[in-house]
Image (cartoon, rainbow, N blue to C red):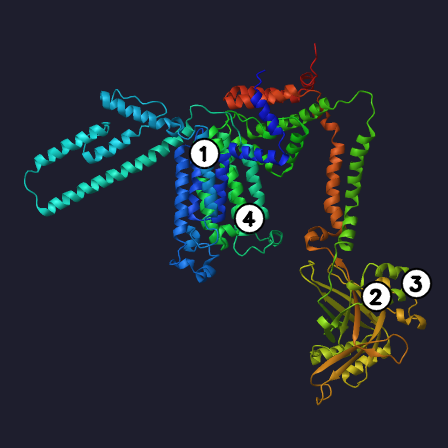
Amino acid sequence: MFQIPEIDESDKFYHSLPRHLQLLFALYNTMVSQSEMLCYFVIILNHMVSASLLTLFLPILIFLWAMLSVPRPTKRFWMTSIIYTELTVVVKYFFQFGFFPWTTSAYHGINAERPFALPNIVGVEKKDGYVLFDLIQLLALFFHRSILKCHGLWDNKEVEMPDFFKKLKKKTEKKRQSGVTRGEQGVTRRRLLFLSLQTSTASLFCRQRGGESLDSHDIEQVKKNHSKKKKWQHKVPLSRKEQIRQRIKERLLEAKAAIIEVALHIYLPIRQFFYDIIHPEYSPVCDVYALMFLIDVVNFIIIIFGYWAFGKHSAAADITESLSEDQVPEAFLVMLLIQFGTMVVDRALYLRKTLLGKCVFQVVLVFGIHFWMFFILPGVTERRFNRNQVAQIWYFVKCIYFGLSAYQIKCGYPNRVLGNFLTKNYNYLNLFLFQGFRLVPFLTELRAVMDWVWTDTTLSLSSWICVEDIYANIFILKCWRESEKKYPHTPGQKKKKVVKYGMGGFIIFALICIVWFPLLFMSLVKSVAGVTNQPLDVSIQLSIAGYEPLFTMSAQEQNLVPFSQSAYHKLTNVYATHPSAMQFIVNYVAEDIVIAKVKSDASLLWSISPASREAMIQELSNSSYIYVTLRWTLLRNTSLVTNPETAGEHTVKYEDKELKANLIRMLQGTRRESVIIDKLLPKYIRGPSGPEAKMAHRLIIEHSSHPEDLHLAFFHPLSIKLRQANGSVEGRGPQWWVVEECTPGPPPVRCQNIEIVVFNDKVSPSSLGFLAGYGIMGLYMSVVLVIGKFVREFFNGISRSIMFEELPNVDRVLKLCTDIFVVREAGEMELEEQLFEKLIFLYRSPETMIRMTREKKND
């Protein structure tokens, strides 16, 4: 309508500029429009980097003065920030001179990382770029000052001087001119009666009658009259001591009056400042509680995943490991409870809509968080705040919360709090977010109970929860009805293949994955991500008839020889014609197999008592058979498996009389030759992740006792011999057993040290151990069946919920729920009860529900 050629040419020139130049102009304009936030950001960043007392003052002023000022911070705040920053630069520069002890390299090397060293905590330590961020902060402040001056907002008296001081000035001048009495003095509604405090202090020193309210002129006149009266009374000359005493009293009274006057000049403006915030003339509608809650949730997550930054000696700790050992770190618990407690208090203040409590909470929280983060936490962690990245992130996010909280205080709480903030719009995004909100354990219940506690209502807790549940279900139905209106389905048209294969195919794929999840998981976790768990120690033990073990020996370190690739190929060639054995061998690679070489001499002397030895000989003589047991034990890495020790045994019953006679003669000391025990030693054993180490049964080949199949023999004979120390009497002195492995076949046999091949199963990595530890059957019982139960409930429970979920139009029911919220906020308690009874009757009467949820007829 109004076209100005100059403006059109300016627009054409701007659009003709290169893109990157336009981007720079846009960034500059954004910085100009948000110069106030830029100053706040630079001040907070400077404090995060410095973490000292010199930089602590301004962030506190931002959250308790600047952000609470209406409509914007005054000139006094900006001048205070500029002057304080300049003084900080001068102080830091002064303390960089070399005659201070902390400027030496030796002092810096010792105390550089100490959080409570004097230069570190004050902020005057010697370092490169010690005033860099202070100069950037000063530059940002001057930039904002220039912006305010350009817009004429720097010297705006209406903004700089609050109403309190203007009314005070007018009142004082009026009283001086007219000399009004106490009864004629009027006090405006928003003005605090602080003059009475001053006059009361003056009357205390001037000994005036209580109840009179005097201005400064009257006080001076009373002082003069009082001094004249004193002079008249003290015509008698005083001694020098009395004169000195009287002067000291007068000076003390003057000092007290001056101190109280200065304190009042500081206290009363602050009191008036918060009074104006709590009792504003107008209150714009503003509700940022949802944003504050999200910021608290982010801080909650930071504490959980970075808890090690809030405790001592916990930088290398693992929260999952601590919780699995039923140990709760103290620092983690304290920070978690503090964060959760502040969220609960913030919710209570929001529901009660009390600005006074919110102001007190803001002041306490600002001072408490700064004291905790910059004084207590460095002492607990023994690290400076600017060396703790997680704590810096947490503090920066908390500063965003302080800004939102100050904005909420400045604008005031909304008059009405209606429902969840996620239920304001009816679309897919709000639907899925609300469903996710309801899936969080105990969150919905905790919110409902807190709302009932801190909201004035006539409903009982069960009735309140009933209304909340109805409202949630109606909101979900409203979202689906709106989506159906936006994407309508033509009657009589079959479903598209995209929908059928997209939704149905996904459900089929998901159900199949759930059914076969344990098998797939256990197979992939060991074949793809599995870790080889070779034994650290292999020990064997030989005993006869349950008596004291004859032989105990173990193989460690260099005696545990890894299986070479050539030996693995040789093993596969030997069992190439046996499918069952090959099926077992191909599950392992050469790195999974270990050869345990056990020495033939026992590690311990045979410490059987003579009585037990005689009993053993007597039992062998009277029995027609003997039992020989060979036990083996594998010790593995405790960090990879829950059962570090696994064991197995092989017991053989021998009825050979010659073997029994040879053993008896050896025990009696009449036989020195070795005794061969056939088919006792299993050549291959398996080291699973469980507690039992079994023999590799699949490598047992039938007819392996034939001469041509001796190389396939699974069980090898053992040669045992009781050896006695040289020089000892026969049957007395130290004795030990010598056990050797012999080659299978007819005599003569060749014996040597025992060699056992151990096949070690792969184990899941520690990150997946919490699932793999259940095993296949455990996963089926704990995961598949539980999920299947929920899925079955969904498919079986549809018919029971048709009446309440297949509602064509839920607008009237939704309006009834919102009406309950509105009358509750308005204080109409009787009407709230009536509407709740109407809602309950609606759900009890199917005919009424059908009438209430019919589609609206278009005339």
Q: Amino acid at mark 1?
A: Ser
Question: Mark 1 to mark 3: distance in Å?
Answer: 92 Å
Q: Amino acid at mark 4?
A: Val
Q: Circle 2 sits on which residue?
A: 568
Q: Circle 3 sits on which residue?
A: 577
Q: Is residue 549 visible?
A: no
Question: Mark 1 to mark 4: distance in Å?
Answer: 36 Å
Q: For the residues labelled 3 and 4, say whether their Cβ atoms are less than 8 Å apart.
A: no
Mark with earlier residue (3, 4):
4
Q: Give percent across and percent down for residue 148.
A: 45, 31
Question: Mark 2 to mark 4: distance in Å?
Answer: 50 Å
Question: Mark 1 to mark 2: distance in Å?
Answer: 81 Å
Select label 1 or label 3 by which is in front: 1
Mark with earlier residue (3, 2):
2
Q: Amino acid at mark 2?
A: Tyr
Dot 3: element: loop
Q: Circle 1 sits on which residue?
A: 146
Select label 1 or label 4 by which is in front: 1
* Residue at 8% in and 43% down: 238
Select label 3 or label 4 by which is in front: 4
Mark with earlier residue (2, 4):
4
* Residue at 64% in and 19% down: 812
Mark with earlier residue (1, 2):
1
